[in-house]
Structure formats: structure tokens, C-alpha cells
Image (cartoon, rainbow, N blue to C red):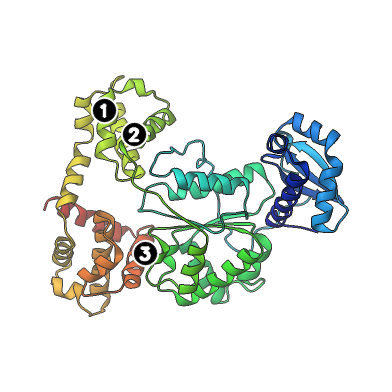
């Protein structure tokens, strides 16, 4: 008996091919079978979800025998079929308390990320369409899907939208959204003996139908973790379970990733997201304005165009500029209509920071960090690994990445030829430490202020 969403999807996709061939009428097929899927198996009955109540009625009256025969040919089992409207389906109540997951207990999908609030433009249209198709047919044609872009362009939004859409359509589907750093942390806990009741690979085989993993580049330089991820990947892929991955660059350029993984990533569908064009940036701003309970009519048209053209490097920059503007016009200079004069005053600090970043270089960052810690630039870029020097080196690498968005390889060259993995691990360490290390937060803030003044 099929148990997972991927197995049910595979059975129905193959059955649909038989149904379409026997029907011989594309119009009837598209009208009544379009978007259909097996919702669940209830005893010897397959519950088939279709796109309307009328569709369920027509299929029940005229095509039940045809569908049952095609399913029987595909499964060698005498299943009965029952057609229901997708809109009438709800999650089945749990008969007992849901078992707490053995691994990734804190993993959650954020419901705010949906396809409906993702702004589509030329820069992301292909990735959006692929994500939407996967959410309607997980484990189907595009497996794995890898979406890559610079930070802040919507990869995480798309990844979570896939998960939320699948859960909305099939509430019992087991969807896991994690980051690569989450995978690393969980593997370390497992490898050190903290998890002994179930193997990590077995967990993925039994308890995951769809794996959504963010920022796969954080596996670079972690050979044992990559080996485990390869095992997990193979297990899911062999079972026909959907895998969606994001990365900061095309898999062919992921230096330090196991070649077997790169090959498998590239064997699926690989799509980029580019920086948004002006039209898309303006649409994003209008959507964010409405999400804040306002109207685009409350803004001069040139304000929206100005923000879109000035902060279009990423969606995060756009949102940050709007948040700054709204804060200013609510708390510092209240107004019901936002003009260009008000806007320029509100975001003057952001423009100043943006311009100062444009003048920065890796060498200036290294020199500033060296001065802050009473070191020489040569010590920071050298090979000495005392804790004080190593910390300063990691901070300088982090600032080069966060302020300049410099590729890891280029940062490594500026630091005496350090390799890609070394730089990535250094940046990751600082990012994690910033979550709870107040002294490090203060040091980073101080250094950013110094760099603004340069």
C-alpha cells in the first residue's frame, strides 16, 4: 500500500497517462482531470481530489470504471476510486497526540511566505513558475530544483511558499524546511551521540516527503556532513520524494562541494533569480505598502520610483528603505501624504551608508579592523592563529561579505590566499555568534561606524 505523498503522486501521474490515452479527448482530460491528485488511501479506496464539485459529479457518473481500470493496470490492485472537490477537503483530525519529531524539532514553515505575496517579474519568473508547478506535483518532473541568487532576492520566500502550498493542498504531507546550517547542527548532535533512537538517514526516509533546504553552500568544507547529506539526498531521490535547494551561486561554481552532490544538483532543474528591474521593484514596494495597511496613493509617484531605483539591489534593501520611511513619517515627522522632500530626509542616513559602502574596499576593512584590535593588516591576512588574531580575521571577512557582498573566493585572495571554505566558515561563525554575543555585536557596530566615516 502506498504511504508517502511521493508514492501517491507517482502512481497518479502514471495512471493519468493511461487515462489520457484511453480518453482520446484533450478537452475532457484538461477540464476534469487538470490539477487532480490522490489525496489519501482509505482502506481499498483512493480518494481523488479534483478541481470542482461539478468535476467530481461528472467523473463519478461517467468515468469511474475507466479510472479504476487504469489504476488497477498501474498498481495491480483492485482499488475503488472516489472523487471529491479539493475545496471540501480538510486535514483529518489526529486520533492521538502527534509524535514529536526525532530530529529538527524546531523546524517550521513561516505562513507569511506564500505565492500570492511573491512579486513576479522578468528577474524571477522562471523560478516562480517552477516552484508553483512543484507545489502542485511534488516528486514529479523537476526534481531536484535548485534556485540560486545573491542574498535578499527571494529564494527563501519561494522555498517556504512551496512548503506552505503543499501543506494547504495536502495537509498530511510531511514537509521539512531547514537551512544547511540546521542540517550541520543536527548532524553534529547525532554524530556525538545525542540522538541514538533513530538514524538520521532513516528519519528522512520515513518522516519526510518534501525536503526544502536553504543555503546549501554552508555545507562547504564539512566533508562528513556532506557525506551524510549525500546519503540523505540519494534516499529521498530514489523514493521519488521532492527536493528543493537554494544556493548563493550556480552549483557548478560551488567550490568545495562534493562532486557527486554537484552532479546531482545539476541533473535536475537549476534556475537563477536576478536583481529585480525597476518595474518589479516598484511592484514590490506597492505590495509592501499595502501590507502595512496603507495605499500607494499616500505616496508621490516619484517617491516609489526613487526608492525602487535607489534600493533595487535586493528585496531586503527595498523593504528596509520603506520601513525607515514609514518609521520617520509616523514617529518623527507625521504626515498623511509622503512627498520627495520628506523621503529624502527620512532615508538620508541610508543613502549616506550606501554611498560610504560604495567607497569601501577589502583593504580598508582589513586596515580598520586591524587598528580596532591594535594589530597590523599583515597579522590579519597572515597565518597566525592565536585566538585574538583569528577573531579579528573572521570579523574582517564577515564585514567584507556583509558590507561589500564580495564573493568568498575574492575575500580569500584578499586575506593571503585563504580558500573558499575557510572564508565561508569564518563568516558563518560570526553570524552565529552575533545571535547571543553582545560584546561581538558592539564591536561590529563600532567597526561599521568607523567604516562609514572613512
User: What's the CA distance linking mark 3 and mark 2?
Assistant: 34 Å
Mark 3 secondary-structure assignment: helix
Residue highlighted by disc 2: 279
Mark 1 to mark 3 CA distance (whole Å): 36 Å
Q: Is residue 251 above or below residue 119?
A: below
In the picture, the disc for residue 45 is none
What is the secondary structure assignment of the residue under circle 1? helix
Q: Say which residue label 3 marks.
A: 428
Q: Where is residue 346 in the image (x, y as percent from the top left)?
A: 23, 32
- N-term mark: 2 or 1: 2
Which mark is in front, 2 or 1? 2
> In this image, 362 relative to 174: left or right?
left
The residue drawn where x is 84% and y is 41% is: 64
x%, y% of residue 210?
61, 56
Callouts 1 and 3 close, C-beta under 8 Å: no
In this view, the mark in front (3 or 2): 2
**Residue 334 visible:** no
The image quadrant of residue 338 is top left
Q: Residue at x 36, y 62 (%)?
A: 433
Pick the residue in front: 161 or 33. 33
The numbered mark, 3 or 2, whose residue comes first in the sequence reads 2
Residue nearest the viewer, comparing 338 with 44: 44
Residue extending furthest front?
Answer: 24
Q: Few, some or many C-alpha atoms within 10 Å of disc 1 (few <14, some 14-19, many ≥20)?
A: some
Task: Give the answer, above or below, for where 307 lies relative to 441.
Answer: above
Foreground mark, 1 or 3?
A: 1
Give the residue drawn at x 38%, y 47%: 153
Distance from the alpha carbon under mark 2 to that under mark 1? 14 Å
Q: Quadrant of residue 310?
A: top left
Q: Is residue 402 above or below residue 390?
A: above
Secondary element at tag 2: helix
Which residue, given by chain and number where applicable, does mark 1 sit on?
Answer: 303
Amino acid at each position: 500500500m502506498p504511504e508517502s505523498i511521493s508514492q501517491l503522486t507517482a502512481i497518479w501521474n502514471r495512471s493519468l497517462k493511461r487515462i489520457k490515452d484511453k480518453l482520446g479527448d484533450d478537452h475532457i482530460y484538461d477540464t476534469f482531470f487538470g490539477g487532480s491528485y490522490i489525496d489519501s488511501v482509505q482502506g481499498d479506496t483512493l480518494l481523488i481530489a479534483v478541481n470542482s464539485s461539478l468535476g467530481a459529479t461528472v467523473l463519478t457518473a461517467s468515468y469511474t470504471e475507466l479510472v479504476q481500470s487504469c489504476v488497477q493496470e498501474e498498481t495491480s490492485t483492485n482499488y475503488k476510486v472516489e472523487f471529491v472537490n479539493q475545496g471540501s477537503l480538510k486535514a483529518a483530525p489526529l486520533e492521538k497526540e502527534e509524535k514529536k519529531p526525532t530530529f529538527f524539532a524546531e523546524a517550521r514553515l513561516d505562513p507569511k511566505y506564500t505565492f500570492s505575496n511573491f512579486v513576479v517579474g522578468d528577474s524571477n519568473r522562471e523560478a516562480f513558475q517552477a516552484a508553483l508547478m512543484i507545489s502542485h506535483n511534488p516528486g514529479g518532473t523537476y526534481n531536484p530544483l535548485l534556485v540560486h541568487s545573491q542574498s535578499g532576492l527571494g529564494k527563501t520566500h519561494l522555498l517556504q511558499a512551496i512548503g506552505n502550498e503543499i501543506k494547504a493542498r495536502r495537509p498530511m504531507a510531511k514537509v521539512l524546511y531547514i537551512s544547511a546550517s540546521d542540517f550541520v547542527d543536527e548532524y553534529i548532535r547525532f554524530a556525538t551521540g545525542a540522538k541514538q533512537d533513530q538514524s538520521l538517514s532513516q528519519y528522512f526516509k520515513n518522516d519526510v516527503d518534501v525536503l526544502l533546504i536553504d543555503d546549501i553552500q554552508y555545507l562547504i568544507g564539512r566533508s562528513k556532513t556532506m557525506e551524510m547529506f549525500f546519503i540523505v539526498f540519494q534516499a529521498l531521490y530514489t523514493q521519488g520524494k521532492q527536493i528543493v535547494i537554494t544556493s548563493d551561486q550556480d552549483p557548478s561554481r560551488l567550490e568545495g562541494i562534493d562532486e557527486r552532490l554537484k552532479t546531482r544538483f545539476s541533473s535536475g532543474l537549476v534556475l537563477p533569480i536576478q536583481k529585480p528591474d525597476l518595474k518589479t521593484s516598484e511592484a514590490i514596494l506597492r505590495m509592501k505598502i499595502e501590507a502595512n495597511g496603507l495605499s500607494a496613493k499616500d505616496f508621490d509617484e516619484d517617491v516609489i520610483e526613487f526608492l525602487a531605483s535607489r534600493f533595487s539591489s535586493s528585496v531586503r534593501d527595498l523593504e528596509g528603505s520603506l520601513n525607515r520611511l514609514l518609521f520617520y513619517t509616523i514617529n518623527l515627522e507625521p504626515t498623511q501624504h509622503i512627498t520627495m522632500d520628506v523621503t529624502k530626509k527620512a532615508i538620508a542616513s541610508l543613502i549616506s551608508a550606501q554611498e560610504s559602502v560604495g567607497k569601501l574596499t577589502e583593504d580598508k576593512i582589513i586596515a580598520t579592523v586591524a587598528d580596532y584590535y591594535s594589530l597590523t593588516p599583515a597579522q590579519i591576512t597572515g597565518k597566525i592563529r592565536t585566538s585574538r588574531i583569528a577573531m579579528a580575521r573572521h570579523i574582517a571577512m564577515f564585514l567584507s561579505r556583509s558590507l561589500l557582498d564580495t564573493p568568498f573566493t575574492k575575500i580569500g585572495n584578499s586575506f593571503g590566499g585563504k580558500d573558499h571554505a575557510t572564508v565561508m566558515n569564518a563568516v558563518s561563525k560570526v553570524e552565529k555568534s552575533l545571535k547571543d554575543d553582545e560584546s561581538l555585536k558592539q564591536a561590529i557596530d563600532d567597526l561599521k561606524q568607523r567604516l562609514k566615516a572613512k
